[in-house]
Image (spheres, rainbow, N blue to C red):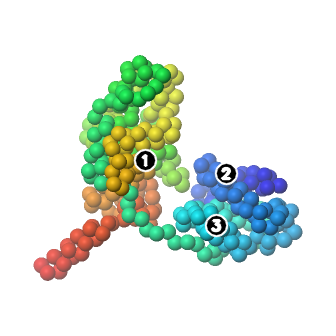
């Protein structure tokens, strides 16, 4: 019955809006994540009560699923499992969606997720690269990487310049336009418009099914232009923007992009700093938000360009202590003028 309950929940997620959204349906990644969380909750239920939570059990006693039970589960995650607040909050979102499903289907007539006490996440300083780290990262893409151990060494070396053009276009796009790695994976040729002195990146299906247009600065346009010229020579039949270089030229997947960015960070020696810096696509996205703020871009515009709400954009570009000190100094200067 647990399996059937999970399947019904997955179908509901695909066909109905989440409690926090008005848009229809959820992405495949969201469905997978929520399903995994609820499967853990159902296993915890069985271990705690000695029996499965089934539709028949809910029909017999709909109040067996209540706020106290959900609160106990969240406490178990935090105290026994040692999960951080961010992970517990993710489980809470999954539970809200699960309760919404049960209400929608008429299995319960109350919402057990109402009034849950949730942990408060500590506000973290931005984890993007500072100017020196960013310069080191960019320098890695000045010459091809030819020292990789591979069984196809000759092919690898002959494609080194082509691989450099592709990987630099991906890395600099993430760094100077801020798309999520999932969004980069989905890009088509028509999603990039390049003009002599400007350009636009069209994100057709961002997080929450939101679309957005992001202007491309020169630092992102030039690598893209180089890659597009090289890609055209390959005679590829499909329209995926970034492709594998092996025969068939299948669309490049996000795992390959993630590995490339991590490897670039290691080649830049950023993982050997004190403290070490592990570069990921999300770190590049943080860096983009940080540079926008440093450039004086308003919070509302930063949110629009990053595909975030204003509240979320603040988390991605929260001022550091020295920036706030400079703001106070500027205020002093204005008052005393």
Query: Which of the marked residues, 3 or 2, is nearer the chain's N terminus?
Result: 2
Cβ atoms under marks 1 and 2 closer than 8 Å = no
Residue 124: percent from left, percent from top: 42, 65
Q: Which mark is residue 80?
A: 3
Q: Is residue 85 above or below residue 251?
A: below
Q: Nearer the viewer, residue 179 or 142?
A: 142
Which residue is outermost to the top? Answer: 154
* Residue visible at 27% across and 67% down in the picture: 323
Query: Which of the marked residues, 1 or 2, is nearer the chain's N terminus?
Result: 2
- Would you identify the image quadrant in which residue 146 lies? top left
Q: Nearer the viewer, residue 257 or 236?
A: 257
- Would you identify the image quadrant in which residue 24 lies? bottom right
Give the number of the mark in front: 1 or 2.
1
Query: Which of the marked residues, 1 or 3, is nearer the chain's N terminus?
Result: 3
Q: Is residue 310 above or below residue 179?
A: below
The kind of secondary structure element at disc 3 is: loop
Residue 93: percent from left, percent from top: 61, 63
């Amino acid at each position: 019955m647990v399996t059937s309950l999970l399947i019904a929940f997955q179908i509901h997620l695909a066909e109905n809006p989440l409690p926090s959204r008005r848009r229809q349906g959820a992405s495949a990644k969201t469905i997978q994540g929520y399903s995994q969380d609820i499967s853990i909750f159902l296993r915890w239920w069985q271990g705690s009560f000695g029996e499965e939570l089934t539709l028949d059990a809910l029909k017999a006693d709909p109040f067996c699923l209540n706020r106290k039970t959900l609160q106990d589960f969240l406490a178990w995650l935090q105290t026994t499992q040692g999960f951080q607040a961010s992970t517990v909050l993710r489980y809470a979102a999954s539970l809200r969606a699960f309760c919404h499903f049960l209400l929608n289907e008429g299995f319960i007539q109350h919402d057990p997720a109402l009034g849950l006490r949730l942990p408060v996440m500590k506000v973290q300083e931005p984890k993007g690269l500072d100017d020196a780290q960013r310069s080191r990262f960019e320098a890695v893409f000045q010459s091809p990487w030819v020292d990789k151990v591979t069984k196809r060494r000759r092919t690898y070396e002959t494609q080194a310049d082509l691989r450099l053009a592709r990987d630099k276009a991906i890395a600099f796009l993430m760094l100077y336009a801020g798309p999520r790695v999932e969004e980069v994976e989905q890009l088509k040729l028509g999603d990039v418009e390049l003009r002599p002195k400007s350009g636009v990146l069209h994100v057709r299906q961002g997080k929450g099914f939101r679309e957005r247009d992001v202007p491309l600065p020169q630092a992102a346009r030039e690598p893209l232009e180089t890659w597009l010229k090289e890609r055209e020579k390959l005679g590829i039949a499909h329209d995926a923007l970034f492709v594998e270089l092996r025969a068939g030229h299948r669309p490049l997947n996000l795992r390959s992009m993630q590995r490339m960015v991590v490897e670039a960070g290691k080649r830049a020696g950023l993982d050997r700093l004190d403290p070490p810096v592990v570069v990921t696509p999300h770190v590049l996205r943080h860096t983009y938000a940080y540079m926008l703020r440093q450039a004086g871009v308003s919070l509302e515009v930063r949110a629009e360009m990053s595909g975030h709400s204003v509240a979320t954009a603040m988390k991605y570009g929260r001022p550091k202590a020295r920036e706030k000190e400079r703001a106070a100094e500027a205020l002093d200067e204005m008052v005393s003028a």
